[in-house]
Image (cartoon, grey):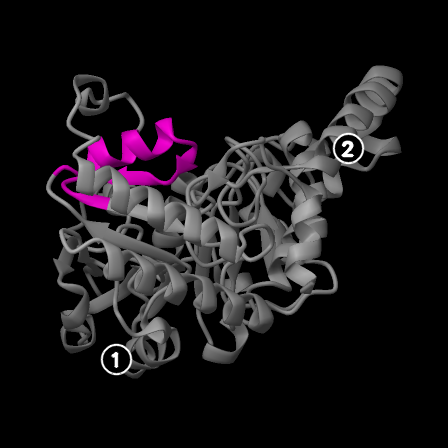
Amino acid sequence: MSAFETRRDMFHLPEGITYLDGNSLGPLPKHAVDQARRTMTDQWGEMLIMGWNKADWMALPGRLGDRIGRLIGAPADSTVVGDTLSIKVYQAVASALELRPGRKRVLSDNGNFPTDLYMAKGLIDSLGQGHDLKVVDPEAVADAIDESVAVVMLTHVDYRTGRLHDMAAITRKAHEAGALMIWDLAHSAGALPVDLAGCNADFAVGCTYKYLNGGPGAPAFIYVRPDLIDQVRPALSGWLGHAAPFAFDLDYRPGEGISRMRVGTPPVLQMAVLDAALDAFDGGDMADIRARSIELSEQFIAQVEASCEKVELASPRDPQARGSQVSFRFAEGYAVMQALIARGVIGDFRAPDIMRFGFCPLYNTADDVTTAAAAMADIIATGEWNQPQFKTRKAVT
């Protein structure tokens, strides 16, 4: 039995469910229930407000940042947890633009997660200084990087197809042109090896409720290159990013190092769950997780294509060019996914026609893959998806 299969026992996986949607929301780590309960009863319950000191709640953002940092190739004291991914994107873009005052362009691609584009455009509109957001095809990013670009902002793994950008090559091209580089690691952290320090990335952001299994609404993280952080002026100058929050100065002074990227009060209960969830990675190697992820995804592609001619692979065929998910296109993909969920096989759907399946070796097995592939082939072959209850769009797809 592999190390990953033994870690499956660390998660609550409901009986009769084949879960291939960890790329959207990771399952509940069993240990998180006890940790959350202790935080509520032993700390909040017994300590009340003294928990900020006695239980050291205030240190959670930095401590969890370092735990995540070890998974993304970030040195100590360069990553901090808190707030939401949208807020962290805003912080990164705002700080990067200010560091390149003579340039007016943010470059991204149409594979970026839409909220990143929304936040960048909203910031540009608020600044009113003539900046623009240029969005190109993923394959055109490198050629679009020139001396007009202040910031290149990309999602490392495409949320729809799983297509994987070459982080080192694009970061290098950005730097050669004098631009700063921001990476969104929402679909990378905890799924594949990332080396932020090795590729000299300037900023990185990400959420913790996908492959890191921090639970719905779990806080986001932000990384800033250590030699850059003291030059960064936080656009969102929240009180917990202040050099002395409890001095209650009326004027803002940024804190030392990465602490200046803190904004609001830490969500202690959510952070307790995330802290427990990160235990699943202790003693593991992201390279091993990556190798097993490729095995599972290759098995899935082979089995689906052998039994279901009507679907089209939307993900890159080369496993080294995709993240830890596999996507297939089918005109009635939403209905097929609903039929799969009704059978207990859970993936998800992204418009207009993409069925997504995430593979997490911490808990997914070869049997999960076989079950899912066989169910999808049968649903499509029999037309089981063609029923009104499977075609009705729900609020979350």
Split into 4 quadrants, where in the image is the N terminus?
A: bottom right
Q: In this view, does 380 lie above or below 1?
A: above
Element carrying mark 1: loop
Q: Earlier in the sequence, mark 1 or mark 2?
A: 2
| Residue highlighted by disc 1 | 177
Q: Residues within 10 Å of mark 2 (few under 14, many from 20)?
A: some
Whether label 1 touches label 2, CB < 8 Å:
no
Query: Can residue 84 be seen in the rendering of this structure?
Result: yes
Which residue is depicted at the point 51% across and 50% down? 211
Measuring from the top left, give residue 382's x and y in whole percent.
Answer: 19, 36
Residue 387 lies in magenta, yes or no?
Answer: no
Q: Which image quarter: residue 263?
A: top right
Q: What residue type is labelled 2?
A: Gln
Residue closest to the eye, 219 or 276: 276
Residue 90 is situated, as x and y percent measured from the top left of the image, at 37, 45
Q: Residue at x 43, y 32 (%)?
A: 344
Query: Between marks 1 and 2, how big is the CA–CA gap?
Result: 47 Å
Q: Mark 2 sits on what residue?
A: 35
Q: Which amino acid does label 1 sit on?
A: Ala
Region of the chain picked out in magenta, as a range: 332-354
Residue 315, labelled with which disc?
none
**Residue 341 % position (x, y):** 36, 31
Viewed as shown, does residue 5 lie left or right of 197?
A: right
Residue drawn at point x = 59 percent, y = 45 percent: 81
Image quadrant where one finds the C terminus: top left
> With 29 as the anchor, is 206 left or right in this view?
left
Secondary structure of the residue carrying numbered label 2 = helix
